[in-house]
């Protein structure tokens, strides 16, 4: 009985959020790693690139509630200086983004003055302001390929840097040397062996933030957005997904006739899960916690973001 009462209350809370959203002329953006309850009340759910693109297109909403981690909300604020951007839980930080502070970027620049600087969107605004161009896991290869330089400083994810280095004949120098996503570092070859034995016909999709020895076992290495498209379009019926578990939540909801299996059920981004329906409602009702970026930093970072978006436009 207790479970049933909780379910009813959550459903009511979702409806209240939708009502508040309309009243406030607000839009809710959510990353693919949010829980199903958050995904269901969002106006748009996507990966980092898709969220960047969506954030650049916001023009008729007064308030943006960003259900993601800190660097994502900062990017929305950079692209929408005239809008109010709030994040439901200010403690929702990306540990990897904090592995590459701006001063470390500047030191790398001094050490490799002839290299182009490409930063993963998973960085804080102060670091973005130092970059020539940004990238996401979906467009990293295209971004690096677009540059005339043959030497590339790339940070902060060493595994994404490795992935790019396998695709292009350029020198990719990771900064820092061991920057990583702790969730994607959880996956190991043993996890793959076990599931391959039990699901021999499954297609294995792996995120490029995973270690190289895991990537090489994949049928496809894809961003979360590309995983969604791949599963929807594939004739295969069974998929093993090597990324955060709530992408599996979305894939199951959108592909009810297919079998979607997480490579590791413990692969949970704890800070993504800090956002709850109660906190989303509070953000709408009281317009907290606002995300602000220093004007000078935002102006510099915006150039790198917009350059990335230009590369990502359909040809």
Image: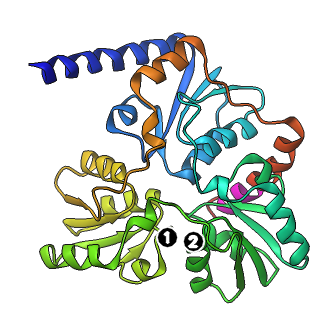
Residue under the point 61% across and 16% down = 287
Residue under the point 60% across and 72% down = 158
Q: What is the crowding at mark 1: few (fewer than 14 residues within 10 Å), some, or many (at least 20)?
A: many
Q: Is residue 193 above or below residue 181?
A: below
Front one among 164 and 277: 277
Secondary structure state at the residue bearing disc 1: loop
User: Do tag 1 and tag 2 residues touch (Cβ < 8 Å)?
Assistant: yes
Disc 1 from disc 2: Cα separation: 5 Å
Front one among 280 and 91: 91
Q: What is the crowding at mark 2: few (fewer than 14 residues within 10 Å), some, or many (at least 20)?
A: many
Q: To which quarter of the image does residue 132 belong? A: bottom right
Q: Is residue 43 above or below residue 226?
A: above
Q: Earlier in the sequence, mark 1 or mark 2?
A: 2
The residue labelled by disc 1 is 208
Front one among 209 and 98: 98
The residue labelled by disc 2 is 160
Front one among 260 and 53: 260
Residue under the point 78% across and 36% down = 293
Q: Is residue 128 above or below residue 4?
A: below
Q: Position of residue 128 (x, y in %)?
A: 77, 53
Secondary structure state at the residue bearing disc 2: helix
Q: To which quarter of the image does residue 229 belong? A: bottom left
The range drawn in magenta is 307-312
């Amino acid at each position: 009985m207790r479970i049933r009462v909780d379910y009813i209350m959550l459903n009511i809370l979702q409806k209240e959020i939708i009502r508040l959203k309309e009243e406030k002329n607000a839009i809710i953006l959510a990353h693919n790693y949010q829980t199903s309850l958050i995904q269901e009340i969002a106006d748009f759910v996507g990966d980092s690139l898709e969220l960047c693109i969506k954030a650049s297109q916001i023009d008729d909403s007064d308030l943006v509630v960003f259900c993601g981690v800190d660097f994502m909300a900062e990017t929305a604020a950079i692209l929408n200086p005239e809008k109010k951007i709030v994040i439901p839980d200010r403690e929702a930080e990306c540990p990897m983004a904090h592995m590459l502070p701006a001063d470390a970027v500047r030191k790398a620049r001094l050490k490799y003055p002839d290299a182009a600087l490409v930063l993963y969107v998973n960085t804080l605004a102060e670091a973005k302001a130092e970059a020539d161009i940004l990238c996401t896991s979906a467009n990293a290869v295209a971004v690096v390929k677009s540059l005339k330089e043959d030497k590339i400083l790339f940070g902060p994810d060493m595994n994404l840097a490795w992935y790019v280095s396998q695709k292009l004949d350029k020198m990719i120098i990771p900064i820092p040397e061991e920057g990583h996503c702790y969730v994607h570092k959880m996956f190991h070859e043993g996890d793959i062996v076990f599931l391959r034995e039990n699901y021999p016909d499954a297609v294995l999709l792996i995120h490029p933030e995973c270690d190289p020895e895991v990537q090489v076992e994949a049928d496809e290495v894809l961003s979360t957005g590309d995983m969604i498209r791949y599963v929807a379009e594939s004739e295969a019926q069974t998929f093993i997904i090597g990324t955060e578990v709530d992408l599996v939540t979305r894939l199951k909801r959108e592909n009810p006739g297919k079998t979607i299996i997480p490579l590791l059920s413990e692969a949970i981004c704890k800070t993504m899960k800090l956002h709850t329906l109660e906190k989303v409602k509070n953000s709408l009702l009281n317009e907290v916690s606002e995300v602000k970026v220093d004007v000078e930093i935002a102006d510099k970072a915006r150039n790198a973001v917009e350059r990335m978006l230009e590369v990502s436009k359909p040809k």
